[in-house]
Image (cartoon, grey):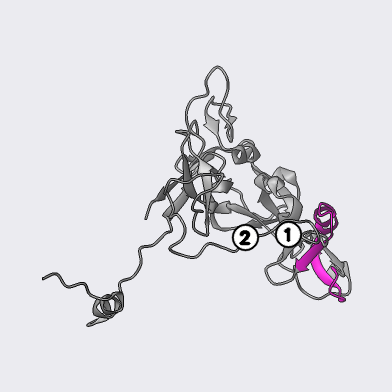
Amino acid sequence: MRVVLPALFLVVAACVGGRAPTPPSSECTGVQCRPPTCCGQAAQDGGCCAGTVRSDAGTCVPPTCLSCGELACDVDTASCSGSCRAPACCLSTCASQADCCAGTACSASSSGAKKCFPTSCSACTGWKGFCKTMAGCATSCETPPSCGQSCTAASECGAGSLCKDPGSGAKTCVPSAYDTECGKCPFGCTFTAQGCTLTCKPNPDAGVDSGVVTEPPAALGSCQACCAACAPDGGIPCCPGNSCVRGESGAYSCTPDACLACAYGCTQTCP
């Protein structure tokens, strides 16, 4: 005789002796952007592919190599990133440009002393216009170290900074590009001292009597996992953190949102 057990009994039986089974993950792991396909390769007759430039040696290299000037540029083809080789005189004390070697310029440091700084610092502009020189003469474009500190005058903030009220009611050290960057925001901007970040304010009228209905996020178990086939115009939606995207084969699949910022595609491990 066949016995049919109630569903409730089955659930309880599954939990006896341990926890309930963990549902399978719906997320992809190891998401990485692909580099431009021609990075590190010899330039063809048509030039280099998008995301690279032709070097004097005829090789397709990342645009950051252009800031190296007379110095050689070491290229990591896996990520298509480039770094300028360190000049021999980097960070040496100087009185004039004659005391510096190729790839450096005699400039005043934050302490006021003149040193031979790498010319790759010229690539640091905008919000991250402060050039930090590290060991090995490697450079990094960052926000000024004084950013977010209270001030009464610009002299307290140092190079590349302004002393102004960013809307908090108190004067604060902000990057010198503050007005330019905030001017790009049609509805104003918000400055956060911690982390020295600037974000654009949303449209205050967005969503008011617009007739647009925002769907609630899909619940786990009622959505398509990462890498699963999907339909862009209906059907079961992709799980949160994924979007229905058309791939190189022409088929649609649930793709990690992190891949949407990858100009040359991405790789990931499916669940």
Q: Quadrant location of residue 263?
A: top right
Give the label, 1 or 2, closer to the camera. 2
The earlier-in-sequence mark between 1 and 2 is: 1
In the displayed image of the protein, which residue is found farthest to the top?
45
Taking the magenta stretch, the answer to whether it contains residue 15 is no
Q: Quadrant of the N terminus?
A: bottom left
Q: Which residues are magenta?
A: 166-191
Q: CA distance from mark 1 to mark 2?
A: 54 Å
Image disc number at residue 53: none
* 204 over 253 or under it: above or below: below
Q: Residues within 10 Å of mark 1 (few under 14, many from 20)?
A: few
In the displayed image of the protein, which residue is found farthest to the left?
1
Residue placed most toward the observer, 131 or 179: 179
Left of 116 or right of it: where is 161? right
Residue placed most toward the observer, 100 or 64: 64
Left of 157 or right of it: where is 9? left
Q: Residue at x 67, y 68 (%)?
A: 195
Q: Position of residue 246 (x, y in %)?
A: 51, 39
Q: Residue at x 73, y 59 (%)?
A: 109
Going by the numbered disc 1, the residue's amino acid type is Ser
Q: Which residue is mark 1?
A: 109
Q: Is residue 86 visible?
A: no
Q: Which residue is mark 2?
A: 215
